[in-house]
């Protein structure tokens, strides 16, 4: 008999080790162990100790003892050899291992409830309509594992569980031993459940930095991960409003500078700028281009775009300044050369404009648009925007 028990223990422990996830621990400090005396035919409720934050599984054992009987092994001591709950619910072997090897002749039924409110009918009339689980057949001992993240009634944020017992001994009192041990997920133990995470993501998306982006998901997840790493949820909630604001700002700046996120941020800004320019919303495009430039991420084409926007809003000095900055970055970019010619032209500097228009008239500004066609298109846009147009015909005649 002893050999069989040892073999079974080794077999189960070995299989648990094979599949062990080892992402949590059995919390023996907050395990529940209670001996309860139930009067003949009576019903009672037993509330577990507070379940720790991050509890995803519980294992419980119920044993009915005859007078003077003592438990041979506590449930906590048995679980010490099991690295995680994986195998306990995978068939009868796990349950057999957890079972007490003693019990009395008495029997009881029991039910599990998620709140004290749901137990009221049970105490009054024995109804188990509100129970999360009910053992209707009388037992003298039982052991089970319950996964809270897969149970619609007992959820991860359940802080206590109520066990209801009904004695099936109509003559004598009976002694019931209830043992409950929680399995705590290390990550969830920090208090960051799905609702808490969504709360942070939602706040992030309202931030100034996030609103600069067409898609701020990666940025907000980056902030969330940094907050989760530094704070437990309860610790973060205790911060003052100004402290939370600083946390968002500091982590936001760090995430904003992340290479991959930064690349997407500026790509999004450029897409937004392109759309605004097509809609002739130049005043709205300028701040977005300034963001790129002030962050030190501007290319020659970014300088060309902001120069073009300043030109269309008749801010010629600013247009000239930014176009010349772009020219320093890439002296071969003909879109910049063309816009420089435009700025000189509308600023009554026809001679400088003429030199540029003549020099590049036989080239393309892109792989598919000629210098001449782009000039004609721009002049049409400029006339519509009310820019000085007295020299437009003179320039077009130069091309003939």
Image (cartoon, rainbow, N blue to C red):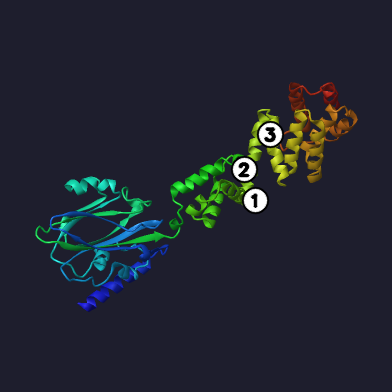
* Along the line of sight, the residue nearer the viewer: 153 or 53: 53
Relative image position of residue 107 (x, y in whole percent): 15, 60
Using the image, determine if residue 297 lies above or below residue 272.
Answer: below
Which residue lies under the disc numbered 2?
209
Q: Which numbered dot is residue 257?
A: 1
Q: Closer to the camera, 300 or 228? A: 228
- Identify the residue under disc 3: 285
Q: Residue furthest bottom?
A: 3
* Helix, strand or loop status at disc 1: loop
Marks 1 and 3 in Cβ contact (< 8 Å):
no
Q: CA distance from mark 1 to mark 2?
A: 11 Å
Where is residue 260? Give x, y as percent.
Answer: 61, 50
- Taking the spot 57% from the left edge, 43% from the top edge, the residue there is 216
Q: Is residue 347 left or right of residue 286?
A: right
Who is closer to the viewer here, 306 or 53?
53
Using the image, determine if residue 78 lies above or below residue 3.
above
Tell which tag, 1 or 2, sits nearer the viewer: 2
Question: Is 206 situated left or right of 350 in this image?
Answer: left
Residue 320 visible in rendering: yes
Lower sequence index among marks 1 and 2: 2
Residue sitting at 66 percent across and 32 percent down? 276
Q: Residue furthest right?
A: 351
Q: What is the quadrant of residue 213 in the picture?
A: top right
Image side of residue 28 versus residue 35, left or right: right
């Amino acid at each position: 008999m002893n050999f069989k028990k040892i073999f079974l223990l080794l077999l189960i422990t070995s299989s648990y080790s094979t599949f062990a996830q080892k992402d949590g621990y059995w919390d023996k400090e907050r395990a529940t162990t209670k001996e309860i005396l139930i009067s003949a035919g009576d019903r009672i409720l037993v509330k577990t100790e507070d379940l720790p934050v991050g509890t995803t599984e519980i294992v419980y054992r119920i044993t009915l003892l005859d007078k003077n009987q003592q438990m041979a092994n506590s449930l906590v001591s048995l679980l010490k050899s099991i690295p995680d709950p994986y195998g306990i619910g995978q068939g009868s072997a796990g349950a057999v291992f957890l079972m007490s090897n003693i019990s009395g002749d008495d029997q009881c039924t029991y039910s599990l409830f998620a709140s004290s409110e749901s137990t009221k009918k049970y105490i009054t009339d024995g109804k188990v309509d509100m129970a999360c689980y009910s053992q209707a057949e009388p037992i003298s001992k039982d052991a089970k594992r319950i996964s809270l993240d897969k149970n619609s009634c007992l959820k991860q944020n359940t802080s206590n569980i109520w066990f209801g017992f009904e004695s099936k001994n109509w003559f004598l009192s009976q002694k019931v031993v209830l043992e409950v041990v929680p399995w705590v997920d290390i990550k969830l133990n920090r208090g960051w459940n799905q609702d808490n995470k969504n709360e942070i993501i939602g706040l992030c998306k309202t931030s100034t930095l996030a609103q600069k982006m067409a898609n701020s998901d990666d940025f907000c997840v980056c902030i969330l991960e940094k907050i989760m790493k530094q704070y437990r949820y309860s610790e973060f909630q205790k911060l003052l409003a100004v402290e939370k604001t600083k946390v968002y700002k500091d982590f936001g700046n760090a995430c904003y500078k992340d290479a991959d996120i930064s690349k997407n941020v500026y790509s999004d800004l450029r897409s937004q700028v392109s759309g605004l320019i097509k809609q002739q919303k130049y005043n709205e495009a300028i701040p977005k281009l300034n963001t790129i430039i002030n962050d030190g991420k501007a290319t020659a084409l970014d300088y060309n775009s902001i120069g073009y926007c300043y030109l269309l809003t008749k801010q010629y000095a600013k247009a000239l300044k930014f176009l010349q900055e772009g020219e320093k970055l890439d002296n071969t970019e003909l879109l910049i050369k063309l816009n420089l010619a435009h700025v000189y032209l509308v600023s009554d500097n026809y001679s400088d404009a003429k030199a540029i228009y003549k020099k590049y008239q036989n080239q393309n500004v892109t792989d598919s648009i000629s210098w001449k066609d782009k000039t004609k298109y721009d002049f049409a846009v400029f006339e519509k925007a009310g820019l000085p147009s007295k020299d437009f015909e003179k320039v077009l005649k130069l091309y003939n």
